[in-house]
Amino acid sequence: MIRVTAGWLAASALALGCGGAAPPPLVPAVVLPVAPAGPGGAFSPSGDRHPGQIVYEDHVEHRTWTRSAADVPATIAWVKVGDRWKPVVLIEIEGAGQQREITTYGPNHEALEHTTARLAAPPPRAPLQPAPSPVTEPRTAPDAPAR
């Protein structure tokens, strides 16, 4: 309690010594630029705005879904073609077994990139082992002589 009181006294004395006014707030000398609004792939690395949605067509699992470009990384939402970044608006997945072919398209169904991948084999299943049979030891009487 004495330390707390002493601290308050020291702070009060310092404030009175400064004329009772609080020191002016510090203003940062450097103002950092604000990144464009929207996380993820909503904007290209060069600052271009994505049209908004990416449609995924998975022909292997026979399903289609849509995600916002802001919800995926820029590496999925944008492809660099030459010296320009182009937005990805459609991703088609084809293949069979462990093989996949992924094609990305830009606006106007312009093919941007084609990737072939081989999925890793699933880990081997543990072999089924029979349950251990209960082990029974011969019973001996507590007073029986050792053999």
Image (cartoon, grey):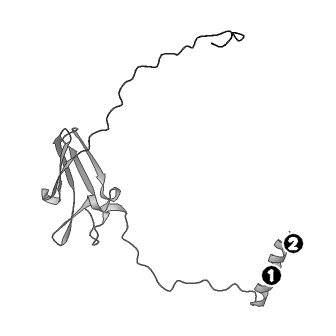
Mark yes or no: residue 39 visible. yes
Seen in the image, is 134 located left or right of residue 113?
A: right
Q: Quadrant of residue 111?
A: bottom left
The mark found on residue 47 in the picture is none
Question: Quarter of the image holding residue 13?
Answer: bottom right
Question: Quadrant where the N terminus lies?
Answer: bottom right
User: Which one is in front, 140 or 28?
Assistant: 140
Which residue is under mark 2? 2
Mark 1 or mark 2, which has the lower sequence index? 2
Q: CA distance from mark 1 to mark 2?
A: 12 Å
Q: Name which residue type carries label 1.
A: Ala
Q: In front: 20, or 140? A: 140
* Other-residue count near label 2 (Cα within 10 Å), few / some / many at <14 / 14–19 / ≥20: few
* Residue sitting at x 26%, y 70%: 48
| Circle 1: element type | helix
> Residue 142's quadrant in the figure?
top right
Find numbered disc 2 in the image and state the secondary structure of the residue it sits on. Answer: helix
Q: In screen coordinates, is 76 left or right of 83?
A: right
Picture coordinates of residue 86 (x, y %)?
A: 20, 65
Check the image and report above or below for 29 versus 54: below
* Above or below 2: residue 119: above
Residue at the image point whose x is 41% and y is 74% from the top:
34
Q: Residue at x 55, y 84 (%)?
A: 27
Q: Is residue 51 visible?
A: no
Kindly identify which numbered label has been placed on residue 10: 1
The quadrant of the image that shows the C terminus is top right
Q: Residue at x 21, y 41 (%)?
A: 98
